[in-house]
Amino acid sequence: MGTILQAENIKKNYFTKPALRGITLSLDSGRILGLVGPNGSGKTTFLKILAGLQKPTGGSFTVNGSPNGYETKKAVSFLPDRNILYSWMKAIDAIDFYADFFPDFDREKALDMLSFMKLEKTEPVKQMSKGMLEKLNLTLAFSRRASLFLLDEPLGGIDPVAREQIVSTIIKTWNENAAIIISTHLVSDVEQVFNDVAFLDSGELILMKDAEALRSERGKSITQIYLDIFGNR
């Protein structure tokens, strides 16, 4: 087991407003990290920096030992919190698009996941529900041979059946040579897949620990701990 991600004192300011206040953490291969906190806590900003979509104001990170740059972008697969596919596409068009764009894209795996998700290849994006779009985008993200998968609010605004399928997909595609970060404020729906959990509050990392050790130490679920920390807001 090796270190996939090493982040050191990551900071991000928007003009004079701090969004991240020095995030330091590491994540090993074969681990799933739950990045939890209320809206506005800095989760999306942190993931976008790791994906190479934003530049940090300060600090640094490595993926597989490589510093932020071309090599880290190749090793990271990012699922944003909103659909980025063109409305004219069908599901198979989206697969073809990703296959053309990413050299590490596994088309056969994508088709297999599409079937597992019960999505039709000819289904138009413009006719898909939010849950269907989420499943298609998750299929695309997980069909890359990446080392670090970043999922930003993959369960937001979708029905419980779709949530269950998405959680099952995360478990099904788990790879001991890769690591996953799942950003969410819907902790109860996905906490069972966390190996580690990190709590963000106003851009600060206030707690990070092995999920099972934290449950044992506090005698509570991750959801209950989340409510203890953020419940009065």
Image (cartoon, rainbow, N blue to C red):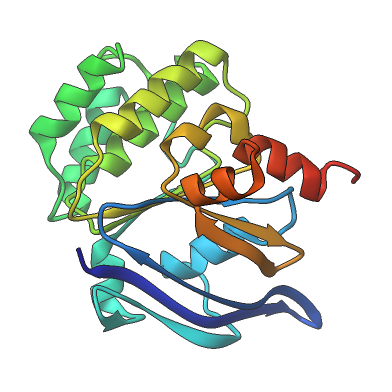
User: Which residue is pictured at 18% across the width and 55% down the height?
Assistant: 177
Q: Position of residue 26 (x, y in %)?
A: 41, 71
**Where in the figure is residue 207, as x and y percent of width and height?**
64, 63
Image check: 154 left or right of 228? left
Quarter of the image with the N terminus is bottom left
> Could you say which is closer to the camera, residue 95 or residue 126?
95
Left or right placement of residue 52 versus residue 115 in this view: right
Using the image as rendered, state which of residue 4 and residue 42 is in the foreground: 4
* 224 shown above or below 66: above
> Which residue is more in the foreground, 39 or 79?
39
Whether residue 209 is visible: yes
**Residue 224 drawn at (x, y percent):** 71, 36
* Front position in the image: 114 or 173: 173
On screen, residue 37 above or below 111: below
Residue drawn 35% across and 24% down?
Answer: 168
Tell me: 217 left or right of 53: right
Vertical side of 107 occupied by 5: above or below: below
Instruction: Please state the horizontal and vertical placement of residue 18, each as a whole percent of the image.
Output: 75, 77
